[in-house]
Amino acid sequence: FFPSIDLKQVKMVKVHPAALLAVLLSSPYHAAGFTAPRRSHFASTYSFGLRASTEETAVATTDVSIPYNAAAKLAYDDWKTTYPDSIGTFENFEKNYYVATVINVIGKGEYKVTLNEKADQAGAVATTTSPLNTAFESAMKQSEAGSALGEASEALAEEEKALAEALGIPADQLEEALDAMEGISIEGIQLEGDEMAKEAKIRSEYMAWAKKFNKEQSEEKFQTFSSNYVLMEEYSLEQGKQMEMNEYADCTAEEYEALMSGEVVPELVEAVEAEEVVVEEAAAVDVEAVQAGILSKAEEVRAATEAMRAASTEAAPEPVIEEAVVTEPEPVVVEKEAPPAPVPAPAPVATTTESSSSSGGFLSNLPKINLPNVNISIPKSTPKDPEVAAAEAAAREQRAAEAAAKAAELAE
């Protein structure tokens, strides 16, 4: 800390080496030639060797010694004119002067340090009153505080991470939940009174619900859950019954319909009281009645189908025309024996032939006629193949089931 110096904005000017040489030559030793500086062997000072230009054959050089703190003394004399009432010492000023010089040489900014009214005082004396020292102390304190805050923030982050892992939720969502419990909304707005309590309650219910149904938590889903939770509370107050959220409590109506794929959408709340269970059973009784009606209609259709099937199966053997067919061949068999009747007819013909032969008739030359045996039979009706009958029965049952389904749709 340097209490004896102040910051001052200065304009830096680049000096050409020739100009610097001109300044040096304008000193009281302008008639002398400037040579490289060297260390004096007789005193602990730096000196410049000056050789008279008028002496062309000088044997030895004349050393004009300049004290090492000459610049500090000159600066001190100038400073005393500005602060004549100072009670400090040159030694203190010299130390502060060197510090300020080093800072100005090393520094590359547009600000340079200058010595103030406490430049001839020790650092301990000016420590409590120096603005620069106060600034340094403030910066150090801020740095220490920043380090402490960083360590505390890292420790808090580790604790939040461990808690989030234990709860099974991401760390950022846990932070939002903790903010909500402290009354801070997602937008960073401080909630007040009832709003804070309500938000904290819903957050707590949401976390418990997500853990119960193994749901992934998110802020978007929480907003949907919060809306459904408010509706559930209102409905619960109207009905005077305690309710709780089911596994679809974080779904919107559209999302729920998509999940159900067009099925009947139940309420988003389920009853936990006996009375509510009774209400659900009453609703179920109506459904069962409708189903019973549909089943009865289906039974009627099935009975009619069975009757039709029985009638068809009974009617098919009825023309058990097999019996009629079996009985009818008897007269046919008689007819089979009838054809030989004409066979004895030739006998008289033969007799007539003999008589005619004696008489020389033409019938004796007629050929013998053989009548064919005619067999007449009625084809018997063969019973249906069992596989064909089974296929027809299955088709009739399918038609009956389709009729029952249509009846059920009409009943709905």
Image: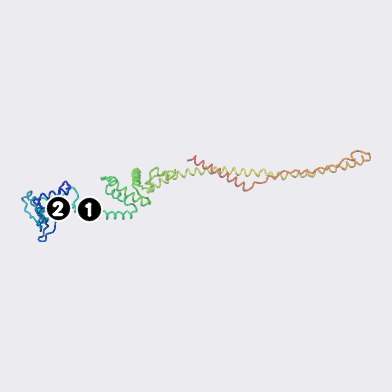
Residue at 38% across / 43% down in the picture?
A: 252
Q: Nearer the viewer, residue 250 or 75?
A: 75
Of callouts 2 and 1, the N-terminal one: 2
Tell me: 287 left or right of 383: left
Residue at 62% across / 48% down in the picture?
A: 387
Query: CB atoms at circles 2 and 1 under 8 Å apart?
Result: no
Gap in angstroms between the C-alphas marked 2 and 1: 32 Å
Horizontal and vertical percent position of residue 358 = 94, 40
Numbered disc 2: secondary structure = helix
Quadrant in the picture for residue 123: bottom left
Q: Amino acid at mark 2?
A: Thr
Horizontal and vertical percent position of residue 355 = 92, 40
Q: Nearer the viewer, residue 6 or 191?
A: 6
Q: Amino acid at mark 1?
A: Gly
- Asked if 87 appears above or below 319 in the picture, the reply is below
Query: Which residue does the numbered mark 1 point to in the structure image?
Result: 146
Query: Which residue does the numbered mark 2 point to in the structure image?
Result: 101
Tell me: 277 left or right of 109: right
Horizontal and vertical percent position of residue 241 = 35, 46
Tell me: 133 left or right of 243: left
Horizontal and vertical percent position of residue 81 = 6, 49
